[in-house]
Image (tube, rainbow, N blue to C red):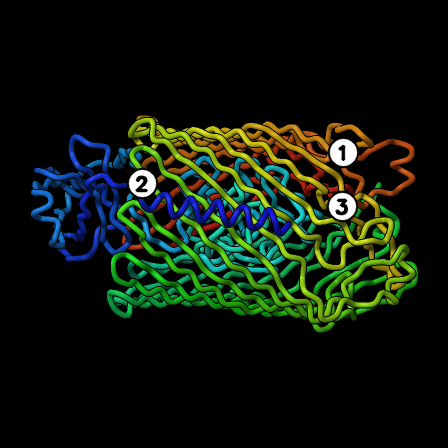
Amino acid sequence: MTVKIKFCLLCLLSYILSSHYLNAQQQYELKGYVYDHETNEPVPNANIIIKGTKSGTSSDAEGSFVLLAGPGKQIIRFTSVGYAEKELQIEVPADNYRILRIGMTPQKIGIESVDVFGRMYPAGRDTSINRLPVSIMPAITKIEAADIEKQGAVTLVDAVKYVPGGWTETRGRKTKQFFSVRGQKYPYPNYSIDGIWQKEFEETGYFFSALDIESIEIVRSSSALVKGLSGLTGVVDVKTKKPEREDVSLIAKYGELNNYTAKLQYGNKIEDLSFNAAATLFGTDGPPDRNGRERIANFHGNINWKINNRLNLFAGATYIHGSREFVNIIEPGAPNIANREEKYDPLSTVVTYMKAEYKGNKGSRTELQANFTHRDADHSNYNIAQESTTITGEKDWEYGFNVLHSQPLSQSNTLRFGGLYNHWEAPGGKRYYVGRSCNVHTWSGVIADEHKTGRFLFDAGFRLIGGYIVEWGGFGIEGSASGFQNVEPIENEAAPVEWQSAFGVTYLLSGSLSAHYNFSGGTIAPRKGSLTGEGVTPETEGRFQHDLGLRYKCPRNNEFSISAFHTTRTNSIDYSGSTVITDNDMVLELYENLDRQSYGIELSTKINVPSLHSSLFANGMVMKGKKESGSDMAGDNQLPKVILNSGLYYDYSGIDANLFVHYTGPYTNNRFVNPAWVAQNGDFPLGDFVSLDATAGYTFKGKFSKRIFAEVKNILDKKYYTVAGYPDVGRLFQFGIRIN
């Protein structure tokens, strides 16, 4: 491992040093500010190009921009939706010493809608801290708040249902929901909230209200190194709502099985200070005669303060409180699971985070992040046969700090580096190892660089992850479940060292078409406490992934992208499908090490049809998985070979109608299945279903915007399975109202 790490560091250092001197061409930096001529407010996302060239950029949230130009007379064109076009002629380098102030005049257009025409330009010197490399653009999906509402999503996991290659495994909807992309699991994708990485967030995703989210950015590739410890399985980056003006909204909906959602939100921006506060309640009674009752409350708030032109402060917090019954398993579920009725009552989670960003000289930026999360729940397990109840407390917390710095090395080269620290502790253990204390420190360092030359844009990065285990008692077994309480904990040991690397290149074929290649690779240490059927710790996994894709963006914001991907996993860490029962009636799942491969193609398209007042999206993934079987590689039937999504939005004269289709191909898994059933029938079939959802509404315009709407989930009433023993509840109707 040491040789690999040294080699990757040497390659990265050579790349940075060489790229610093590659750009000797005569280019000059133009800086400016775009603002509304009537209100003096900044104009974000204005398109800025030099006529007759491919050089262009856009203004940031504060209206500022940086543009590279060659010598001589240049004409710069400024365009933005809702504003009259403006052109400015300058002499370079004579005028590049001053800050250009561009006032744009609002344009009054008396039509129902505006078509946005976009082109794609090579990125200029973008010094933002969390910038994603352009080389993974075909592997990025962004979901906006409007999509979340029209899809009828209630939780964060609901909102990622239609992501290309997205795969959600649901145990009864109210037990657990695991989301992954391209079948890459163990670990599952990381989450970040407003750019701040969260360590133990997976189970919080199905409590977190989707109605507090402004957008979700899913990075299906594993090359978002600056966003946190990506785990080589992708990143789900959640942006919460931040108002630009006074905003009040009320949403309420109710439907079958006593499903309900209600949200009240208020936000405002007063000069350089903006804030937002919201309360959301959602619940259900669950499927008939199978428990699943749920009552969850979310209270969310954030504040954003631009202290001066250099310093910005942002802070946010979410408090989740409620109760959740686990939906009962049905045949052919394992008898020991069917003998239990479980619930969390009460459960509470507090997620807090803050970041301070400082803009230095010559485009440098430094960001300090901090977060603290506290989770506390009482887990109740009722044994039906013994008519006895066991209640155990599950409490854990984490806090962390992350420092990121972005430093331009030249007009075409930007270096980013940072360091992260996290401390996680569960003094009484968690659900599967209650009573076994866990106390772990994690730290990590990252360095990444981006260099632009001509039509090429290169990026590279390296992250090293280490830590220290004060105590870890979360072992499942030692050969058999009866030895659970006798396993000696790990104490005062260094955690396994992990490394991650990335390299990408983008080539701009034209103003609207680009080609991308991205490589990422590294190691994944087994989750602490995981054991194989032989009672030993799994080997460290090596995971390497390649992405090759095209992205096309044309007028009216129509987009198309295609990506081919290939993933190799050596000693992959995965569930073996076998389970054992502990002395206290807990089910423990055993792991295995197997070599695995997967490869496939993803396609995604978005098309706007203004003449029909409609837009549509479609995406799909076709994948082939293989795993080690003896001395050969055999097909991996635990991965779906096909995942397809499509949606149609219609909006005209206050009427909106939206239709969504999802298909997950067949796969098998024997987790939670009665062994006698498997012996008689073979592997349990999952997937192979079509899910059809629809929403429709009418908006009354006036001083207050009012939308009444109806939602239908699973129109075809399919009782499909994604995990054995937990079928979908079938067709559900809901009705609601939204007032803004």
Q: Which residue is mark 1?
A: 628
496 horizontally vs 143: left or right: right
Disc 3 residue type?
Tyr
Disc 1 residue type?
Glu
Q: Secondary structure at mark 1?
A: strand
Label number found at residue 22: 2
Viewer-proximal residue among 538 and 590: 538
Disc on the earlier residue, 1 or 3: 3
Viewer-proximal residue among 657 and 680: 680
Quadrant into which the C terminus falls: bottom left
Q: Residues within 10 Å of mark 1 (few under 14, many from 20)?
A: some
As drawn, which residue projects farthest toward the bottom?
Answer: 427
Q: Secondary structure at mark 2?
A: helix
Q: Which residue is mark 3?
A: 575
Disc on the earlier residue, 2 or 3: 2
CB-based contact (under 8 Å), mark 2 and mark 3: no
